[in-house]
Amino acid sequence: MNYHDIAEIVIVVGGMLVLSPALASHFEAVFGGKRHPLSFLGPVEAAFYRLARLDTEEMDWKAYAFSVLTLGLVSIAVLAAILMGQAFLPLNPRHFAGMRWDLALNTAISFVTNTDWQSYSGESTLSYFSQAVGLAVQNFLSAAVGVSVAVAVIRGIVSRGQAGLGEKAGIGNFWVDMTKTVLYILLPLSIIVALILVSQGVVQSLGDYVKFHALAAAGSGSGTASGAREGLIPLGPAASQIAIKQLGTNGGGFFGQNSAHPFENPTPLSNIVELLSLILIPAALPLLFGRMTGRKRQGRAIFGVMFAVFALCAIAAIGAELHWGSLEGKELRVGMSNSTLWAVMTTMTSTGAVNAMHDSLAPLAGMIPLINLMLGEVIFGGVGSGLYGMFALVFIAVFIAGLMVGRGPEYLGKKIEAREVQLSMVAIVAPNFVILVFAAIAASVPQALASLGNPGAHGLTEILYAFASAAGNNGSAFAGLSTNTYFWNLMLGAGMFIGRYGVILPILAAAGGLAGKKAVPESSGTFRTDNLIFGVLLFFVIFIVAGLTHFPALTLGPILDHLGMVGAAR
């Protein structure tokens, strides 16, 4: 590790710690109806409600969940239609044909669920219309859904309760939350980031691909045919999509190599900006929770646990890669340390963007991103999804704490009862079911195994990573697995859908139940949830849940792969 590597890590981590509190303050003003620097856009917001004829009344959790699910299903249908019919749509200078139905369905589910898994290479498959109108729009909408759900869950927790309403108590209006998130948060930040990326050389164009003539064909002699020296430089509206793919923890690459491509990530500054972009909103949301509750220590407690796990995983992965890894599969302009840091951050934040191949990481270094996915990506998680996923673990930790101190578990004055615990367990089990059961099916089906690029423990790691990425709505791939087949497109599509809505719906139901409960005053016997003791308890709950569930699979995958590598080297 050299000084440049250390400087980039310090800048990224320091930038997150400095900027996330300021962003949390802006979020509080936006969702609290206070004045903020973008309040002058209020007439635009009001005009949108009128034109769309949206009901802005407060919703209970059932209406909120129905709106989330309806938007998701309609978006999947529309995006799949765009992808299959792109040959007949404008902005298609390369005259790309429409996608096959299973790949289109997989891609539509992927982008609508904030996963952005790609079984194709963008520059050779998608038109500019599909990229900008299809995928980029979903990058905004899927990210806004995550933030909206997180804010709705916070409202359910902090609500003082309304007598007689029960689960009919309001947790906000989904369409209003969505509009505010896009208009006041995602769009302004995306404009800023896109302009910075363009200044660094990230391509942003609607022009056709550019033909070039190489001075000499690679590995050729004087007799090489001139046709071999010709090629195409792909262009497109990349910077605008890369900005929101990072800010919205979407991660889908405009080009096949994602942020390892020089047109997506050309300089050290663009690498820093993209890393900061993917962590800022997830890091700000737990601090927003503290502000909305009026107890900033509550938000800092959750933030502290997230940061502790992040630091532990980053140190472990970078250390393992520096000890056992190599430059194979990494961009020389990025280096081993920052490639590994990116792999850790992109799997902790549900982003899925890559600037190196995870398949090329040393087995133990590659295990850390896999563990991040298996934890449910709650450290710091996707925009919104990390926080509401963490709440499921918080409710379990509070329930355990209640058993330890011998009194009914409470969180911010709200009783955590059997219903909240059961719903939290559904949210925790749903993605784990996808990872283990779907991986077991894939390991038993010859058509699925035919897509593997590697046998043995490494091949099992590829399968586990694919379904963990789908279930966690991450979208990064371990590489070495050819997934553009009917089996993989449909199985991964189902996994992405379950991983998204199998968590959102039970957590919204729990929030709705909490919203209808009267808060009870704290007493001397109340177990505090804003101190180091609770932080340590939550830390161990996170790892015990993931460890007990996934340790056998990790042993047969990356751990066995590491032992085989070390044994072969002796």
Image: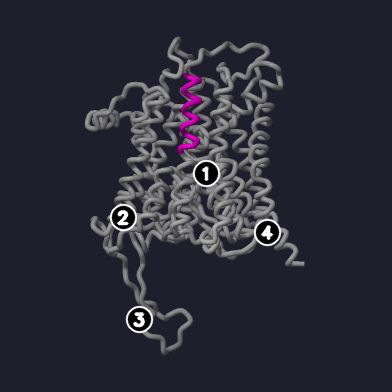
What mark, if any, has residue 561 been given in the picture? 4
Q: Residue furthest bottom?
A: 223
Residue 461 shown left or right of residue 46 in the figure: right
Write the residue at 67% across / 42% down: 547
Nearest to N terminus: mark 3 or mark 2: 2
Amino acid type, label 1 = Gly
- Is residue 4 in view? no
The crowd level at tag 3 (other Cα within 10 Å; few <14, some 14-19, many 20+) is few
Which mark lies nearer to you, 3 or 2?
A: 2
Please, what secondary structure does the residue beneath circle 1 have?
loop
Which mark lies nearer to you, 2 or 1?
A: 2
**Cα–Cα gap, marks 3 and 1:** 45 Å
Amino acid type, label 3 = Gly
Write the residue at 47% across / 49% down: 274
- Is residue 329 in view? yes
Which mark lies nearer to you, 4 or 2?
A: 2
**Cα–Cα gap, marks 3 and 2:** 32 Å
- Residue, disc 3: 227
Amino acid type, label 2 = Met
What's drawn in magenta, residue-wise? 501-515
Write the residue at 59% across / 49% down: 369
What mark, if any, has residue 84 been given in the picture? 2
Quarter holding the N terminus is bottom right
Residue 283 shown left or right of residue 205 in the figure: right
Which mark lies nearer to you, 3 or 1?
A: 1
Is the Cβ of the residue at disc 3 closer than 8 Å to that at disc 2? no
Please, what secondary structure does the residue beneath circle 4 have?
helix
Nearest to N terminus: mark 1 or mark 4: 1
The crowd level at tag 1 (other Cα within 10 Å; few <14, some 14-19, many 20+) is many
Residue 404 vs 95, above or below: the answer is above
